[in-house]
Image (cartoon, rainbow, N blue to C red):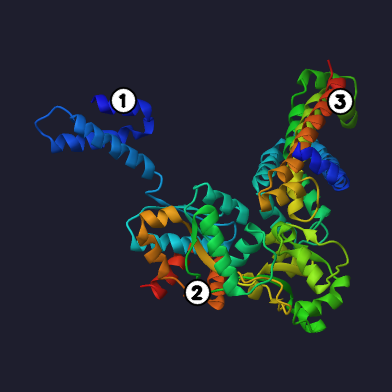
């Protein structure tokens, strides 16, 4: 009830923060896909790189967000304060599931199918785009789905470097122990995470090879 | 045996003390198999007593989520350990002012270091204004009557909000006071912690009193990161704490609050009155520290923790052996 009153009194601000939040998640996921999927394909081609790259992505996942921001603020181009730093941090956190699932999806393609493609005279590129990626699409998409859902939650920390988003309500609420404020940030973030999960679940079902 | 079983069933966690009491009673009445009716009553009242103080027989020291609060808590904890026989539990780095306040009201912690001005404006929600003595008196009275919390003597320093800029900028523009800042503010960018933006004695009042207008609304961010952002030139003004060790280390300067907007923020231990009644030795132990810690000394202790990364336990131990051997 109090929450509804809060939203009606601050609807413009709340919508602004929600939009900011969506942008943070969207941009960071797109960048993470652009880096993670090629990297995953590369790992499937060069199995020897798998351990160091996945190990690195694993380590990145464990860096506490405030510590990561501390490292990022002094850096030129990718650092500073504001949305850019937050997006860099979110990309770092989104990489692991995307790389891992892309690798797993392609490595999981039946060797017999790959041989058949080769036998038909496919080049490496044709094999990738016409056989491996379509077969791995389901697994890759589920990696992106996991990364997005995590991103919606993690994006609340963007408020710590002045990048806005729904985390602003959470940080403000925690600073003054105001449960309504905390909920005003946490509840839409949770709903957003569920919505993203459902939506990407639908996409995944369409693309899965059956 | 019957008593043990009964009480054990009623209050599961009381079973161990019950057994100990009953064993002690058996020792006291060697001829009998168990406590008599009279003994039962003793056991029962002993148990009620044990139940009541099982939680209070240790002192829980809390702290807010920044170095100085952790240091003061560690000093309080070690002083209680040195001067009394009470076990001390530390719950450091809990959260902001309001988190600690809720925790001590709920009895989750027994003592933490609070600042008079913070209690006056942020907790009691008074408008900033009166001088140091009246703030302290008011805060003492209202804490005692509203929540049975006692303010002990202050440590001796005043950790006010510090409107902080880079030294180079201060020299270039001749900035000495917050009033000087008003002239350059329209071209500058500010970054503040969430608490400063939300508090009654925070940014809203400051900008009104000094007529501060920045190029954009101040960036809201994590307090610890604001120092970093200022030192790296990402923002131009922050609100730090005047006893912070980072200020000197990062070549920053504090602008004087020439219109006396901020109330005094004298740090003092706030203790649950119940704890002081049951253990007056806690009050005696902490009274030894009154007035022993001035601004410069506090800044040095903070710098040892934040800049030289020394263990706060060692810093607290050194300081205590020096001022209260």
In terms of image quadrants, where is residue B159?
A: bottom right
Classify residue A66 as left or right of residue A83.
Answer: left
Look at discs 1 and 3 and give the one toward the viewer: 1
For marks 1 and 2, give the CA distance: 53 Å
| Subunit bearing disc 2 | B
- Extreme-left residue of the structure: B31
Estimate how packed mark 3 is, as few (under 14), some (14 to 19) or many (20 or more) residues with alpha carbons within 10 Å: some
Indicate which disc, 1 or 2, sits on the residue closer to the N terminus: 1
- Extreme-top residue of the structure: A210
Tell me residue A115's x, y (percent).
81, 21
Q: Looking at the picture, do discs 3 and 2 lie on one chain?
A: no
Q: Name the residue tied to disc 2.
A: B293
Q: Name the residue tied to disc 1.
A: B6
Can you say whether B14 is above or below A80 in the image?
above
For marks 3 and 2, give the CA distance: 63 Å
Can you say whether B323 is above or below B124 in the image?
below
The residue lying at 64 percent from left, 76 percent from top is: B248
Q: Secondary structure at mark 1?
A: helix
Can you say whether B127 is above or below A17 in the image?
below
Quadrant of the snapshot with the C terminus of chain B: bottom left
Count of number-bearing discs: 3
Q: Is residue A126 visible?
A: yes
Tell me residue A14's x, y (percent).
84, 45
Tell me residue A173's x, y (percent).
70, 49
Q: Tell whether label 3 touches label 1 (CB within 8 Å).
A: no
Classify residue B257 as left or right of residue B289.
Answer: right
Q: Name the residue tied to disc 3.
A: A203
The residue lying at 31 percent from left, 25 percent from top is: B6
Q: Looking at the picture, do discs 1 and 3 lie on one chain?
A: no
| Subunit bearing disc 3 | A
């Amino acid at each position: 009830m109090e929450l509804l009153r809060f939203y009606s009194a601050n609807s413009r601000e709340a919508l602004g923060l929600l939009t900011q939040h969506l942008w943070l998640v969207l941009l960071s996921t797109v960048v993470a896909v652009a880096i993670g999927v090629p990297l995953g394909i590369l790992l499937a081609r060069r199995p020897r790189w798998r351990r160091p790259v996945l190990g690195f992505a694993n380590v990145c996942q464990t860096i506490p967000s405030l510590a990561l921001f501390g490292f990022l603020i002094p850096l030129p181009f990718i650092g500073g304060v504001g949305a850019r730093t937050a997006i860099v941090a979110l990309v770092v956190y989104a990489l692991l599931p995307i790389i891992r699932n892309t690798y797993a999806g392609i490595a999981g393609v039946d060797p017999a199918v790959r041989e058949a493609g080769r036998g038909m005279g496919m080049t490496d590129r044709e094999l990738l785009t016409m056989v491996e990626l379509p077969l791995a699409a389901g697994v890759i998409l589920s990696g992106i789905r996991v990364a997005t859902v995590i991103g919606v939650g993690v994006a609340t920390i963007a408020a710590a470097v002045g990048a806005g988003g729904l985390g602003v309500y959470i940080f403000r609420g925690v600073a003054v122990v105001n449960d309504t404020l905390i909920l005003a940030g946490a509840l839409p973030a949770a709903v957003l995470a569920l919505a993203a999960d459902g939506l990407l679940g639908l996409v995944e079902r369409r693309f899965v090879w059956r | 045996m019957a008593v043990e079983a009964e009480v054990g069933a009623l209050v599961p966690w009381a079973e161990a003390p019950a057994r100990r009491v009953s064993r002690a009673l058996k020792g006291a009445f060697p001829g009998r198999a168990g406590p008599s009716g009279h003994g039962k009553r003793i056991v029962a009242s002993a148990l009620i007593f044990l139940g009541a103080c099982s939680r209070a027989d240790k002192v829980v020291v809390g702290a807010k989520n920044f170095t100085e609060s952790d240091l003061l808590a560690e000093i309080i904890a070690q002083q209680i350990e040195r001067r009394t026989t009470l076990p001390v539990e530390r719950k450091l780095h809990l959260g902001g002012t309001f988190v600690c306040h809720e925790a001590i009201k709920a009895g989750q912690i027994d003592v933490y270091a609070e600042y008079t001005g913070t209690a006056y404006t942020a907790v009691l929600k008074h408008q900033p204004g009166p001088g140091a003595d009246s703030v302290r008196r008011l805060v003492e009275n209202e804490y005692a009557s509203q929540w049975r919390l006692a303010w002990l003597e202050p440590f001796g320093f005043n950790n006010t909000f510090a409107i902080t800029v880079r030294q180079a900028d201060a020299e270039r523009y001749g900035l000495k006071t917050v009033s000087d800042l008003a002239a350059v503010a329209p071209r500058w960018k500010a970054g503040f912690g969430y608490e400063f933006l939300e508090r009654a004695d925070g940014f809203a009042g400051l900008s009104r009193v000094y007529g501060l207008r920045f190029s954009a609304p101040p960036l809201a961010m994590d307090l610890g990161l604001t120092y970093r952002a200022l030192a790296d030139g990402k923002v131009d003004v922050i609100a730090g704490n005047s006893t912070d060790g980072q200020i000197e280390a990062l070549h920053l300067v504090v602008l004087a609050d020439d219109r006396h907007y901020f109330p005094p923020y004298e740090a003092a231990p706030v203790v649950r009155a119940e704890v002081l009644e049951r253990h007056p030795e806690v009050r005696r132990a902490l009274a030894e520290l009154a007035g022993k810690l001035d601004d410069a000394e506090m800044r040095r202790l903070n710098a040892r923790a934040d800049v030289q990364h020394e263990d706060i336990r060692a810093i607290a131990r050194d300081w205590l052996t020096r001022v209260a051997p």
